[in-house]
Amino acid sequence: MKARAASLLLMAPALLLLAAVFVYPLLRYGWLSFQASSVLTGLEPVPNGGANWGRLLDDARFWTDAFQTLRFAVCSVALELAGGLGLALLLHRPLRGRGTLRALTLLPWALPTTVMALGWRWILNDPHGPLNAAIRSLGGSSYGFLSTPATTWFFVVLADVWKTLPFVALLLLAGLQTIPEDLEEALRLEGAGRLQILRRLTLPLLVPYLTLALLFRLAQALGVFDLIQVLSGGGPAGSTESLALYAYLNAMRFLDFGYAATVMLATFLLLLVLLGGGWLLWRRERAA
Amino acid sequence: MRLLVLLWSLGPLLWQLRTSLLRPEALVAPLLEGNPWTLANYQLVLSGDPPFWRYLGNSTLVALATTLLTLLLAVPCAYGLQQQRGLLRWGVGLGLVGAAMFPTVLLFLALLEIARRFGLANDLLALSLPYAGLSLPLAVLLLRAAFADLPVELEDAARLEGLDLGQRLRHVLLPLLGPALASTGILVFLASWNEYAIALTWISRNDLLTLPIAIARIGGGSVFTIPYGAFAAATVLGSLPLLLLVLVAQRPIVSGLTRGAVKG
């Protein structure tokens, strides 16, 4: 008993900092979301009942952004899981220079998002970027990739996949390493082809890792911020704006802290419902 | 296949390298007469005000301070958590998993208020406080998994020898945790080196910016006025330390993520 109390003491400093960084903000947002705190009130909080939440329900921009964020997250995470699985299978095979190959494929994940977001802007530049130069040399004419919603969206997803696919691949690689080689060998002796082995052995055993990657990446993608802020600024015409970017703009550009807090809390609650609901569904599916 | 993968991962980076070595005129006129190559972009970036290495230094300072602070807090916490039983252990574990997944950008407003109230804005060392908080969930989970891998008999034997908790940690347990500490430290270092939303709102003084913010500021104007040559040079310089780190520490990074995945 004494030992357990002492170990609680050991945890205290870390738990205090965690409470300050994660719990306090959520409580604070809960309080702020029932205050008017903007330029109109001289940035002082004034209770306004549930006005912020009423406004949120009627805020078309919020719901559009929620839909856009969800669409972005689902598409990019699906691509990352598929591509990450392929890359993991490749990196799992015994190859010459495998360590270096792993390190180099990991590099996009290790670099700051903003840095490569600007890099993509240069690659997509109209008319001087390499992509447009290639199109012109093939006889086409320059295209403003970042000035139509469809292409901007496509490249935002592409840039996200480029950056985070290696991370997913690494998680799955960890899973692959837990599969005993004898099992694979046994299946092969039974005459199973590579696709059959993948379907009957590898994928079922990877399910926990795929789930982990899915949950983790989905949570991160639903909070996407820096990539979109730098690559497209949420444009053109708000067509790539995410919930996190909308919350940021409310706080730092419109200086409406009460409403910004409401948007952030609502985003968090949506996330909780989506991931928690998905998790429960998955558990029931598995139990059945 | 290998080549294709490398082209996909490194292509955009190699293009930055090429851009950084071109004269500005060569960027807009691909078929320019004469020698298009130059180091002028690097000179421009390195002689700026403040010079570019300043941002590298700022980021390194914050990342090192964060890594140190995180490990200092996470090691005892992971050990303590491993000793707990029942509801507390389950609850804290679940909370840590939830916090590790939490999109950190949603926290910036409340953290900014704290920074303003306590005068922590524009202070690089203070910035490592929220960074350590954000890194703690993953760090504690990874280190707890490492503690769980150690044989119980080891610590029991040390206890019978009469070593107190501090001695057991320092002389018996920590030496065996070396690899886990290294991989956790590297992951924390990378995360805080690259953090954006909090650095963006906490730091406003130009000479204190961290690298991701400084580079994003270069691109702060409209799409057409970005000095792409200088920006590319900054990208290359800013990527080099990370390239070295990833090449050297590939193994601990992979094993760190692996351990996290197995136990997570």
Image: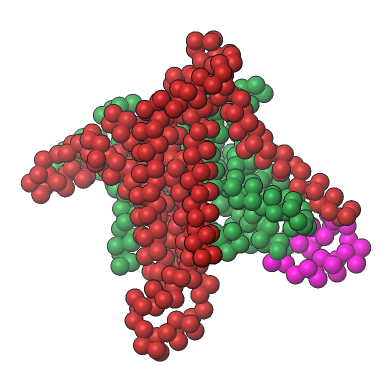
Chain colours: A red, B green
Predominant secondary structure in magenta?
Answer: helix
Q: Quadrant of residue B23?
A: top left
Classify B206 as above or below A13. above
Which contiguous range is marked in magenta? B149-173
> Is residue B17 something that shows in the picture?
no
Place of residue B202 in the rendered image (x, y in percent of width and height, measured from the top left): 55, 28
| Residue found at x 42% / y 84% | A187
Classify B183 as above or below B154. above
- In the image, is residue B246 part of the stretch drawn in magenta? no
Place of residue A228 in the rendered image (x, y in percent of width and height, measured from the top left): 38, 37
| Residue found at x 50% / y 58% | A282
Place of residue B110 in the rendered image (x, y in percent of width and height, measured from the top left): 59, 28
Q: Quadrant of residue B163?
A: bottom right
Q: Is residue A81 left or right of residue B143?
A: left
Q: Is residue B168 left or right of residue B203?
A: right
| Residue found at x 46% / y 70% | A204
Classify A168 as above or below B56. below
Q: Is residue B243 left or right of residue B86?
A: left
| Residue found at x 53% / y 72% | A178
